[in-house]
Image (cartoon, rainbow, N blue to C red):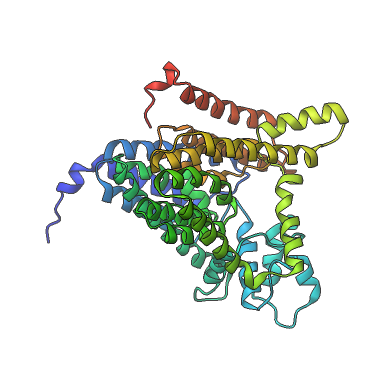
């Protein structure tokens, strides 16, 4: 049987680039520890170079890039996450739900100390693996996220790896959905369809979502599907999907104000009220099985930790923290966090009410800017948080989220030392690059006009 070699001859370079990227991902998935920062940085940068060249060379071939995106994710299918230990808590919460225990009412430590008659599989290994921070706090993952934790545990087998595989399949399917509906929106906006691969082939997305099992992909699928339905005039079903996005991760709540001008311009006040009502009722119904007086206080306390206690890879907050130290002599995060939250609220609402929103593309760009403000003023910015920014950038002329998705890998160098202490010079370098590109793009400075990604 003769093999038709025409395809291979015509796509020799792109095939070699794809094979190289798959080998890099294999090494990342199965032969890397996060303390090996030289290898981490080398692989990460190499993957971005290959991603850029692939989109540049074979951007016309959507199917080729789609297959590459899927294969890149499948490489991780039996890998244990090596940059994050959050998956232990995901599996833990899934088992609590299966045992009929409300995951919002008890910390992992409280569950262990209760010596439950019916224990979950691998209980001690899961408890030890999640680390002290997760052990001592109640779950804050919303109901749809909890559902996917359970679905992951339903994958055949009772090992930690079987749950990992189950959750990873859900994440990969969600990303395929993002590609599908993202492409449809790009076509509707008469934008290049290949732009969706700025998300789908982005190493940050593949490594952090598929590799490290962060469920932003599920949230993003519901967001993009919601926007697609809204573009088609189906606001009721769009509201349902947006409620599912909020019930996966709370961050879409920040996007709520941006719908006001859209509805008032393209629909009417009645539809706007209806949209918000459907979202609110759906979210309430999804939380309803878990609601109790203890749930409300526990969930509020756990969520507030992101403003009052946690700090990692921040930008403006770190500057404010330094000023606070110089004035008072101690960390003023409890005060600064609340002030920054108020500032986020004011700026986001200002963007929502005063920026133009003549079409759906402008709506997405406004959302991109709103999320950017949020992350720049946050006390905690983990790499996977940028996933929504990366997707929204595909619908805009702004490429600073892509630059940010490259330089944010510097945040992992905090794990290069035994005490996991951040090097603030590296944090400063990361944000200097990000702010440089943001300023260049916002003010259309000459050196940035001809940069194409």
Q: Residue furthest right?
A: 329
Quadrant hosting residue 107: bottom right
Looking at the image, residue 7 sits to the left or right of residue 56; the answer is left
The quadrant of the picture occupied by the N terminus is: bottom left
Image quadrant occupied by the C terminus: top left
Q: Is residue 374 above or below residue 101?
A: above
Residue, far left: 2
Residue placed most toward the observer, 180 or 80: 180
Measuring 32% from the left and 53% from the top, which residue is drawn there? 67
Extreme-top residue of the structure? 446
The residue depicted at 30 percent of the width and 44 percent of the height is 193
The location of residue 129, given as percent across then percent down, is 68, 61
Q: Position of residue 162 (x, y in %)?
A: 53, 70
Q: Is residue 404 above or below residue 147?
A: above
263 or 200, which lies in front?
263
Q: Residue shown at 53%/39% (left/top)? A: 352
Residue lying at the far bottom of the rendered structure: 117
């Amino acid at each position: 049987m003769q093999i038709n070699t025409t395809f291979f001859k015509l796509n020799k370079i792109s095939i070699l680039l794809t094979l190289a990227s798959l080998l890099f991902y294999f090494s990342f998935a199965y032969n890397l520890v996060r303390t090996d920062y030289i290898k981490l940085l080398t692989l990460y940068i190499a993957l971005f170079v290959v991603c850029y060249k692939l989109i540049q060379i074979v951007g016309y071939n959507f199917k080729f890039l789609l297959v590459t995106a899927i294969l890149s994710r499948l490489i991780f299918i039996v890998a244990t996450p090596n940059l994050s230990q959050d998956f232990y808590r995901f599996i833990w919460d899934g088992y609590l739900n299966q045992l009929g225990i409300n995951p919002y009412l008890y910390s992992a430590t409280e569950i262990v100390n209760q010596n439950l008659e019916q224990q979950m599989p691998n209980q001690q290994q899961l408890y030890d693996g999640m680390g002290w921070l997760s052990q001592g706090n109640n779950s804050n993952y919303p109901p749809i996220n909890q559902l996917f934790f359970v679905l992951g545990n339903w994958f055949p087998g009772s090992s930690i790896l079987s749950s990992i595989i189950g959750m990873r399949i859900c994440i990969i399917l969600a990303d395929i959905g993002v590609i599908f509906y993202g492409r449809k929106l790009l076509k509707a906006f008469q934008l290049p369809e290949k732009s969706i691969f700025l998300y789908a082939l982005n190493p940050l997305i593949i490594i952090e979502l598929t590799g490290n099992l962060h469920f932003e992909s599920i949230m993003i699928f519901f967001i993009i599907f919601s926007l697609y339905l809204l573009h088609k005039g189906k606001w009721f079903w769009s509201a349902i999907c947006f409620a599912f996005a909020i019930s996966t991760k709370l961050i879409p709540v920040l996007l709520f104000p941006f719908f006001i001008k859209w509805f008032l311009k393209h629909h009417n006040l009645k539809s706007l009220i209806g949209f918000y009502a459907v979202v609110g009722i759906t979210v309430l119904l999804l939380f309803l099985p878990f609601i109790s007086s203890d749930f409300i206080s526990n969930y509020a306390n756990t969520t507030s930790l992101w403003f009052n206690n946690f700090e990692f890879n921040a930008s403006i907050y770190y500057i404010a923290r330094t000023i606070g130290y110089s004035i008072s002599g101690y960390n003023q995060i409890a005060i600064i966090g609340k002030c920054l939250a108020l500032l986020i609220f004011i700026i986001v609402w200002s963007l929502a009410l005063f920026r133009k929103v003549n079409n759906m593309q402008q709506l997405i760009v406004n959302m991109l800017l709103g999320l950017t403000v949020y992350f720049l003023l946050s006390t905690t910015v983990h790499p996977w948080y940028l996933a929504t920014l990366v997707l929204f950038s595909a619908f805009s002329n702004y490429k600073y989220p892509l630059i940010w998705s490259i330089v944010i890998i510097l945040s992992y160098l905090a794990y290069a030392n035994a005490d996991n202490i951040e090097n603030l010079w590296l944090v400063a370098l990361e944000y200097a690059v990000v702010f440089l590109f943001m300023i260049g793009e916002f003010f259309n400075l000459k050196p940035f006009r001809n940069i194409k990604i």
